[in-house]
Every structure is written in C-alpha cells, then in structure tokens.
Amino acid sequence: MVSYKELGLVNTREMFAKAIKGGYAIPAFNFNNMEQLQAIIKASAETKSPVILQVSKGARNYANQTLLRYMAQGAVEYAKELGWEHPQICLHLDHGDSFELCKSCVDFGFSSVMIDASSLPYEENIALTKKVVEYAHKYDVTVEAELGVLAGVEDEVSSAVSHYTKPEEVVDFATRTGCDSLAISIGTSHGAYKFTPEQCTRDPKTGKLVPPPLAFDVLDAIMEQLPGFPIVLHGSSSVPQEYVDMINQYGGKLPDAVGIPEEQLRKAAKSAVCKINIDSDSRLAFTAAVRKVFAEKPGEFDPRKYCGPARDLMEELYKHKIINVLGSDGKAE
Ligand SMILES: [Zn+2]
C-alpha cells in the first residue's frame, strides 16, 4: 500500500471547490510517455496551474501502470525543481471499469479514480460506483463517476451514440453513491472525429465544419439540481485546425476532424464544470510536429530531434488551454 500523500500528490477535493468558487476549470491531461509528461509539468509549473494527470486503460497497457505512477512521483519533484514551490498535482485513473482496477490504483498511489459504469443499467452503475467510493474514501482518494453516455472512441471506451445525462437522476445518483464529482454527457465526444459531417453545418466562407453546440440547457438543469457540485466534461478537445492542417500538409490524412469550439469550453469552465479532459489535442500536436520534422529532414533518425519539437508544441498547447480556455493559471501559487 502506497499513499499518494507520501508522493506529494493531492486529491481533487480542494482543487474542485476552489475552481467552482473561482469560475475556472482544472485541466485533466492524459499522459502515456515522458515527453508528454514533461510538457504538462512545464506548462503547469510555469503558469502555476493545478493539474490532473490522467492515466487511461490504454495508457496502462501501453506504458505500464507501475512505471506511470513512478513518473507521476517524479513529476512532483520535477515541478519543484522548476520553481513551483507547492505543486498541486493529482494522479487520476481515467475510465476505470472495475472495482479491482480502481482498488489497485488506490493501493498504488493514485489520488483520484474514475469508475465509469455509465454503460451499465442505472442501479448497477450506482452499486458499483458506491463500492468504489466506500473503498477509495477510506484512503481519502476522490472518485469521479459518470452518468449518461458520450459518443466517440477513446482507447477502449467507445459508443456510437450519445445519451445526454438526465438531470432528474443526478441528485439520487450523487446522494446514493457518495461520488465526489460527476462526468456528464451534454454533447462532448471522445476522439478527433467528434461529429460526422452530417451532424455539422459548413461555414460557407471557409468550407470548414461547424459542430453542433453543447447542450447548455442540460448543464443548467443539472447545476440547478446539484448546486455547487463538481461537474466533469470528457472528450473536450478542440481539434485545432492548425494541427490538422499541419498533419495533412506533411503527408497525413485527417479529413474533416472536428472538435469542441474553445469558446464553448470557456463558457463551461466558468460554471460548475471544474474538470475538463483534453487528450486528442496533444496527440494532434505531437503528430503534427513529428510529421513536420520527418518531411523537412528525411535524414533525421535521432528520436530526440523529433520528439523534442513534439514536446515543445504540446507545451505550447497546454499553456494555451490553461491560460486562454480553462483560466486555471495562477491558481496554485
Ligand atoms: Zn473520457
């Protein structure tokens, strides 16, 4: 048993309470490798933003849960070395799908876990979430649950259609499970293809796809039911066109990739939405930078020469999100 407190990590309780009061959201960035983690920590340390490091099931399979945890521990020390005196870093399991997995993360130094039982029938979602909460809370680990279904594909989580969260269920769900935060479905979606061209309209001037707006009426109804309760948005990458264009320019093929417009996320961050998950955007930045080096310097074979620029571009992206979209800069001095 390793407590996250010994590792210098924090859970989400205080972060979320401050974020709701202050009208901003905490970035939740997924990581799978060293360059991504370096970029996240540098961006957070430089902007003094609290940050949630997310490990998905796919990341655990790719990089190994043990190694990822030690990397997160190293990240705390790295942050201090960068001059961030009191780093506010949370290590979070993204989309945990069983009690055993959540338990193993709690036992192994994670400070927060998500139990995603949203694909199960309502009562089963409650039962499983409650079981995870009871265990996690013994160790002061916070728990995110999910109600409603997001469309899209993220690692092993996928669904063809979305079902908005039903506002009439949230009080019962939150009360009976005791969860600390709730991921809801209001039209965000996993992956870089959040919407089909048929779901979008086309800007007559640019020819670019314009996605359908998020269901803010559903969010409002949920906040009315659960005033001040921490709400989480998954699948909230914006799929920046500059990265998509760069990828396509240098030999990639990502036609009609489309995400959530940043002004909608900015609006959400000011509400009870206090955690916004961003993964695809950093994948796009990484790929765009690597493709550029490969296209311009075909003789390059030192991974540091293409992973380095990828890291720089991701850092720029993370800072942009923190400062211009979430508003979490300067909140963890
Ligand atoms: Zn997700």
Image (cartoon, rainbow, N blue to C red):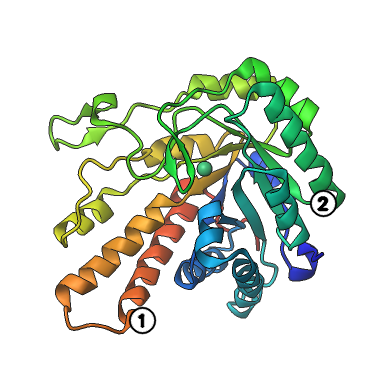
Circle nearer the N terminus (1, 2): 2
Inspect the image, locate mark 1, and give the three-letter code of the amino acid beneath it. Answer: Arg
Q: Using the image as rendered, state which of residue 320 and residue 283 is in the foreground.
A: 283
Q: Quadrant of the N terminus?
A: bottom right
Q: CA distance from mark 1 to mark 2?
A: 39 Å
To which residue does mark 1 refer?
304
Q: Residue at x 70, y 27 (%)?
A: 124
To which residue does mark 2 refer?
140
- Which element is circle 1 on? helix
Inspect the image, locate mark 2, and give the three-letter code of the amino acid beneath it. Answer: Asp
Q: Position of residue 51 (x, y in %)?
A: 59, 57
User: Label 1: how many residues lie within 10 Å, few (<14), some (14-19) or many (20+)?
Assistant: few
Does any portion of residue 94 appear in the rendered image? yes
- Using the image, determine if residue 63 lies above or below residue 116: below
| Left or right relative to 22: residue 14 | right
Q: Position of residue 141 (x, y in %)?
A: 77, 51
Q: Using the image as rendered, state which of residue 125 and residue 200 is in the foreground.
A: 125
- Using the image, determine if residue 55 lies above or below residue 172: below
